[in-house]
Amino acid sequence: MNQARRLPRIVLTCALLWVLAPLTACTAQQAYGAGQNWQRNHCNRIPDAMERTRCLQSAATSYREYQRQKAASGPARQDTP
């Protein structure tokens, strides 16, 4: 399966985690960790070694670093219809 076909599934899964996380009463850090575990599992199924390595490097971002990157990118954009 190529990268373009996997991306919508990854986005959908992340969106579902984002929506369902408050229902499970877990913290944002726990939700982030669950998402990282899912991503690592996904990465380990990639047959191409270089692509798998890139994927695992992306999944290795700590929650603290994620928060720094999020803060540096500025306020979240709110789309209004």
Image (cartoon, rainbow, N blue to C red):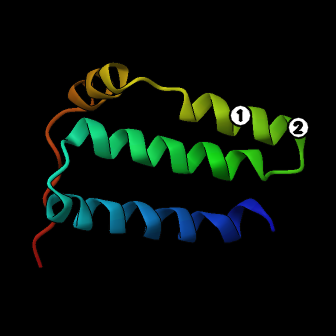
Where residue 59 sits in the image (x, y, percent)? 55, 35
Residue designated by label 1: 54
Q: Residue furthest bottom?
A: 81
The answer to whether residue 64 is left or right of residue 38 is left
Residue 81 occupies quadrant: bottom left
- Position of residue 28 relative to residue 63, above or below, is below
Are discs 2 and 1 less than 8 Å apart at CB? no
Residue 72 appears at what percent x and percent y? 25, 24
Q: For the point 45% across and 70% down, which residue is it?
A: 12
In depth, the one of 45 and 81 nearer the eye is 45
Quadrant into which the N terminus falls: bottom right
Query: Disc 2 marks which amino acid?
Result: Ala
Up-down relation of residue 74 to residue 14 (above or below): above
Q: Quadrant of residue 68?
A: top left
Give the image location of residue 75, x and y in percent: 14, 39
Distance from label 2 to label 1 (Cα)? 9 Å
Q: Residue at x 35, y 69 (%)?
A: 16
Callout 1 amino acid: Arg
Disc 2 on helix, strand or loop? helix
Q: Which mark is drawn over residue 31?
A: none
Q: Position of residue 38 (x, y in %)?
A: 53, 51
Residue 9 to residue 71: above or below = below
At x 89% / y 45%, what residue is drawn?
48
Front-lying residue, 37 or 46: 37
Residue at x 56% of width, y 70% of height: 9
Q: Which residue is mark 2?
A: 49
Q: Earlier in the sequence, mark 2 or mark 1?
A: 2
Number of numbered discs on residues:
2
SS category of the residue bearing label 1: helix
Mark 1: few, some, or many residues within 10 Å (few <14, many ≥20)? few
